[in-house]
Each structure stands twice: as structure tokens, then as C-alpha cells.
Image: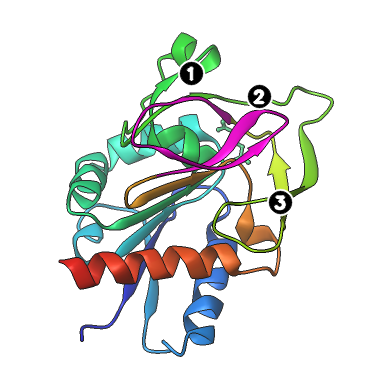
Amino acid sequence: MRVMKIGVIAIQGNVEEHVRALEKTLAEQGREEGVVVKIRHRGIIESCDAIVIPGGESTTIGRLLEREGIVPELTEAARAGKAILGTCAGLVLLAKEGEVEVAKTGQPLLGLMDVKVKRNAFGRQKESFEALLSLSFLKEPFHAVFIRAPIITHAADPVEVLATLKGHIVAARHGNIMALSFHPELTEDRRIHHYFINTCIQGRNKS
Ligand code: GLN
């Protein structure tokens, strides 16, 4: 079988942390031959099996994705059933619609998940916090780091809610696409990266 290739959008934000977490996860699964590449321009996504959109500033990442001509490639990857993971700012970008700030600034969204999002939803004094989160696909809670985190305010069918915190949706999956409000790349717990790579393998086996 062809070697697995995972691309991390490397325009801005927590890029290195995701690359490291993915490399360690591949090694833990005995897939040392798998590669993780950084995506800064168009022409790379087509050869990737899975894509990660990291946290950072969704306005900046979105603008540069447009400028570099990467947006249509991401749309095509989603359509082709490739696994896509968006964390924090990545979650904002994956959404179809945004509230408040997102709507006001008219920032570009990829619209790949049928959800509505709200940026910086936990307020100023709680810009960063940590919480033990129950995710539907994990047996034990996950220590989740939230940094100026967004929430999903509305998820349409067939979006599956994977976790809520204080009544807000903070993790969801729409087919091959998964979005998280928090940063799994900032802790040493790689269960979410394992789950993501397994989703990617299922997608490859189907195609
Ligand atoms: N608040 C940021 C945004 O909406 C996301 C923060 C993050 O990715 N840590 O772009």
C-alpha cells in the first residue's frame, strides 16, 4: 500500500506541535514509513491522505489560504472523503457559518462542516483554561486545553456531537471531518490523533 501522507496547514499557529504529535502517533501505530508534511502553498494537498488545520488566528489563516489558492484544494479533499481535522481556529475555518465577530468581519470560511460557530466564546477572563472532557469515542476523559476557544452554536444533521462543555458543543464530526475547540497537540495524550489517523485509514480503505 502507498505510504500514508498527512499534511498540516503551516501558514500560522500551532504547526510544529501537530507535526510532532502526528509523527509520534504514526510511530506508535507502527507506521514509521508514514510522512507528515507542511502545507504552505497549493499543489501538496492532492497527494495527502489527511489534513490538519491547526489553531492560530482564523482570520489570518483564512486570508492566506485564499491568497495561496489552497481553498479549492481543501474543498476537493473534503469531497474526496479525506480525513480533515481542525483545531480551535481550524474549527472556525471549517464551519459553514459564524456568529457575531465572524459574521461582522465577513472573514472567509471554508464551509466544509454544517455548523455555526462563535469565536472567543468563553469570554476574556477565561480566555485560556483546561478541563477534563468526555469525548464520545474515548473511554476515559481527555485533558483539554482551551485557548480563546470557539464553540459550535448550531450543528445540523448529519453532524455528530462528540463533546460538550457547559452546554456548548466543543467537538463534532461531519463524516470524514472533525473539529475541536481545544488543542490536543499541546498535551502528550495522543488518543485523538490516533482516532484521527484511524479515520483516515478507514477512508483510504473505502476509496
Ligand atoms: N480565537 C482564535 C480564532 O478564532 C482561535 C484561537 C486558537 O486557535 N487558539 O481565530
| Label 3, ligand 1: CB separation under 8 Å | no
Determine if the C-beta at disc 2 is less than 8 A from ligand 1. Answer: no
- Of 71 and 130, which appears nearest the observer? 130
Magenta: main secondary structure equals strand
Residue found 52% across the figure and 66% down from its top: 193
Q: Earlier in the sequence, mark 3 or mark 2?
A: 2
Q: For mark 1, what is the residue?
A: 102
Secondary-structure class at tag 1: helix
Residue at x-position 31% and y-position 77%: 4
Disc 3: CA contacts within 10 A as few (<14), some (14-19) or many (>=20): many
Write down which quadrant ligand 1 falls in: top right
> Disc 2 or disc 1, which is closer to the eye?
2
Mark 3 sits on what residue? 144
SS type, badge 2:
loop
Amino acid carrying mark 3 in the image: Ala
Q: 10 Å neighbourhood of mark 1: few (<14), some, or many (≥20)? A: many
Q: Is residue 86 left or right of residue 46?
A: right
The stretch drawn in magenta includes residue 165? yes
